[in-house]
Amino acid sequence: MVRVLDTAALLMWPPEKLAGGVCAASQRDELERVDTSRAMLAETVDLTWQDVPSTWLAEARTVAAASGDLPRLSDVDLDVLALALGLSAVLVTDDFRLRNAFASVDGSVEAAGVKKRTNVWSWALRCTGCGATSPVNEDAHRSKRDAVGECRTCGSPLVLKRSRR
């Protein structure tokens, strides 16, 4: 089975375990920024560095929006998710948001280093002013910490909150 490796696996796994994995081309720059020596090591391992077709990326955005994880995923995260979806691969990651989005469509996830989480969460946007909730859509603002939009009713910031099933 094909394995798509997130940057966590590239940073933590020994070279022999990385061999045969698939990575997004955008991960090269991320790996270089985080750990230059691991970036050099990754170049010596039998990895497939693949560009992400736009159709796969659009599917990844749709899946991540449906699970509510889109606002907290980086561009590289979306590329990794798109590869896992497009290749019907096992996703190797410790990133909870990536795991959650991929698992929401019954994708197979393998932990890179931490214990595998089995539950899948859903997320919704909630207004900090009036308390209105709405689903996360594909054009949601993406940021690791900031508000992810403004309420259409009262103009207050929207934040991500775990929704009840």
Image (cartoon, helix red, strand yellow):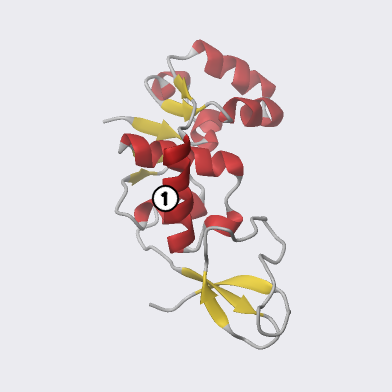
Percent coordinates x, y for residue 91 in the rendering: 39, 40
> Residue at label 1?
115
Q: Which residue is painted at 70% across and 60% down in the image?
A: 145
| Residue 115 visible (yes or no) | yes
State the residue in front, 62 or 5.
Answer: 62
Tell me the residue at 53%/76% (across/down).
134
Q: Position of residue 130 (x, y in %)?
A: 66, 88
Which quarter of the figure is the N terminus placed in? Answer: top left
Amino acid under label 1?
A: Lys
**Residue ID at (35%, 58%):** 118
Would you place residue 145 above or below residue 164 in this image? above
Tell me the quarter of the image containing the C terminus: bottom left
**Nearer to us in this view, 39 or 124:** 124
What percent of the width, then of the height, locates residue 73? 57, 51
Relative to 156, residue 95 above or below = above
Which is nearer the eye, 99 or 77?
77
